[in-house]
Image (cartoon, grey):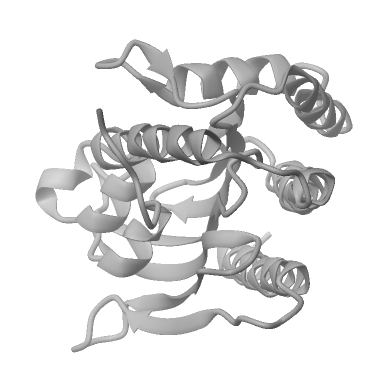
Amino acid sequence: MDLEIKQKLTSNWFKSLQEMFCKTIGDFEKNKISFKSTTWRRNLKKDEGGGEYRILKDGKVFDKVGVNFSKVYGKFPKKFQQNIPGAQKDPRFWASGISVVMHMKNPLIPAMHFNTRYICTTFDWFGGGIDVTPSKKDNKEKEVFHKILRDMCNRHDKNYYKKYKKWCDEYFYLPHRKEPRGIGGIFFDYKKDNFEKNFKFVRDVGVTFESIFQKIISKKIKKKWTSKDKENQYIKRGRYAEFNLLYDRGTKFGLQTGGNVEGILMSLPPHAKWK
């Protein structure tokens, strides 16, 4: 398949996911509060793509949720080329993706994160994942969450879940705290062996994420919580912010390739505490 066609297919899918997620999130808020949408360009002087990030704040269900779509291209800075597969021979790149971060009003509902992306250098690959970060332990929720991911992965390859769960556990870990960020999920990168197969998997990851956040929110949306629960959520959000600012690849990639700063940092919670 022609590379240009692959790029069009993937970016159109990521954009349609943005629309779908925002519609579902709006339904939870009963459309009484809306997303603030911001479009941006990577380079104001020449065409190097851009994107749109949408942020909803202070809802009855969501304290803050961001849904970010991007499609950018150009050349990697020299200092960054050695860190990107395929960029050493040719610094030109094309990348598109979608990322979602949900910080909930009810502290019994976990923070949730999803992203998928397609990157082209001298070769092209998919990456992404889903992970959940509760501030209060819920073993049943953890079990159901991982079962959904396992079933989804098994539809594509029996080896995916074990491999990508392990990768997620290792990735979303705070070495300085010696603790995981949350209850894990799946994380994958450099999927380049078969475009059709990999794209089918990536689409399923997106659809599955919507199913997951709908199930989790619907189950807990009316559950009562205490001020102590909220305090624990603020502390956990501090850990979330530490990971995203210190270790997250997507944050580093976006900042080092001239992405929109507000869109990149949309993953940060609206309020957090440290003790």
User: Which residue shows up at 49% across the image and 66% down it?
Assistant: 68
Q: Is residue 210 left or right of residue 246?
A: right
Residue 196, can we see it?
Answer: no
User: Which residue shows up at 77% across the image and 27% down it?
Assistant: 141
Seen in the picture, residue 187 relative to 217 is either above or below; the reply is above
Q: Quadrant of residue 153?
A: top right
- Where the C terminus falls, by quadrant? top left
> x, y percentage for residue 209?
73, 47
**Which is nearer the eye, 22 or 58?**
58
- Where the N terminus falls, by quadrant? bottom right
Residue 247, can we see it?
Answer: yes
As drawn, the residue found furthest toward the front would be 227
Q: Quadrant of residue 219?
A: top right
> x, y percentage for residue 259?
29, 66
User: Which residue shows up at 52% across the image and 60% down it?
Assistant: 63
User: Which residue shows up at 44% across the image and 60% down it?
Assistant: 95
**Which is nearer the eye, 198 or 205?**
205
Q: Quadrant of residue 9?
A: bottom right
> x, y percentage for residue 40?
35, 81
Seen in the picture, residue 10 relative to 78 is either above or below; the reply is below
